[in-house]
Amino acid sequence: MAYWRFVEYVTEEEPRRCPIIEWYGTLDPEVQAEFDIQVKALSEIDNWDDARPKYKELDRQHAGLCELRLKVGKRHFRPIGVLLREERTFVFLGGCEKKGRGTTDPEQAFEIAMNLKRQLEAGKGALREYAF
Amino acid sequence: MNTLSEVWQKFAQNKAYRSAFARAQFKRLVPLQIQTLRKKRGWSQHELAEQAAVTQGVVSRAEDQDYGNLTVNTILKIAEGFDVAFVGRFVPFSELDRWYVNLSSRTMNVPSFDEENDALYEFENTARSTAKGRDESLIAVDARFKNERETGMEAALANSAIVLSPTEYGGGLAHAGIGGHTS
């Protein structure tokens, strides 16, 4: 059994959407493979202090979010979610590729994730096991 | 019922994926195992470097999953430092799939030769007195290390919640400063 569990957020409104799966589907196969391996690796690290800098808990306007840090070649990808340390669980809310000057692809990825986090706070939507 | 693993289904969809997966597992999981083994032994990077006759910088890079330029020669030196074997060989994807699915801290955390040898002799002596065979001793040694690994895992998980449904996340969300579910 892994030390950490990864789950994905599914929106409440119809048609129900799973942002992390949608984003994953846009990635090149090479990035998908790197993503899968990194998530598996993180799930097997007991103390996430040892996992830095593979993740970062965000602050200021994105406080409460946590990004995983995935580097593939020279490209930087950021799966975004909420880290529940007590439950040893990471909730995926979406993802993006970091571009220059604070921009992301897709645009506003962190703001979108913040909105999903608020929906989660309000009890809307659902969570399910992330299969990797 | 679908008996194929998620990762196998991805292998089957796309050669680019499975090729990248094979590269990524080597690039990321060998560093992870080096770090796991070092921490299990309570060694600093400097101590491992001394054992492996490399510099601390080499160990630091060897534990960096993004480094991506780890040489087999360095891995073999580090294996020697841990007194374990590193087995690099060609395998079919089915073996990679099985290995990945079963991958855990338990399978990554392997004993040194001396640890195994001491345990083996201990069980050999017991086996001689009880007329058990060598195979039974080896099985017993393997079971002993397996139990130790699992005990460590159980202790680590003792305070962690098993979260299965959305509503059960309420407590965790509260811990994280997020309101509980009401739906």
Image (cartoon, coloured by chain):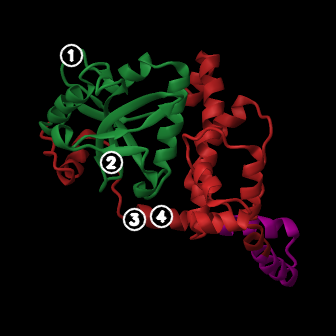
Residue B102: horizontal and vertical position, in percent? 60, 45
Q: Identify which amino acid the numbered label 1 is placed on.
A: Glu
Q: Which residue is under mark 3?
A: B158
Which secondary structure, mark 2? loop
Q: Is the residue under label 3 in contact with that under label 4 (CB below 8 Å)?
A: yes
Range of magenta residues:
B118-145
Say whether residue B133 is magenta: yes
Does residue A52 appear anywhere in the picture?
A: yes
The answer to which of A107 and B89 lies nearer the viewer is A107
Q: Do labels 2 and 3 share a chain?
A: yes
Q: Identify which amino acid the numbered label 4 is placed on.
A: Glu
Does residue B4 appear anywhere in the picture?
A: no
Rendered position, A90 above or below A8: below
User: Which chain did the renderer colour red?
Assistant: B
Q: Is the residue under label 4 in contact with that under label 1 (CB below 8 Å)?
A: no
Which secondary structure, mark 4? helix
Q: Earlier in the sequence, mark 2 or mark 3?
A: 3
Specify few, some or many for label 1: CA neighbours under 10 Å numbering under 14, 14-19, or 20 or more.
few
**What colour has chain A?**
green
Q: Identify which amino acid the numbered label 3 is placed on.
A: Ala
Q: How far apart are marks 2 and 4 (CA)?
A: 16 Å
Q: Chain for mark 3? A: B
Say whether residue B61 is magenta: no
Q: Which residue is under mark 2?
A: B163
As drawn, the label of residue B72 is none
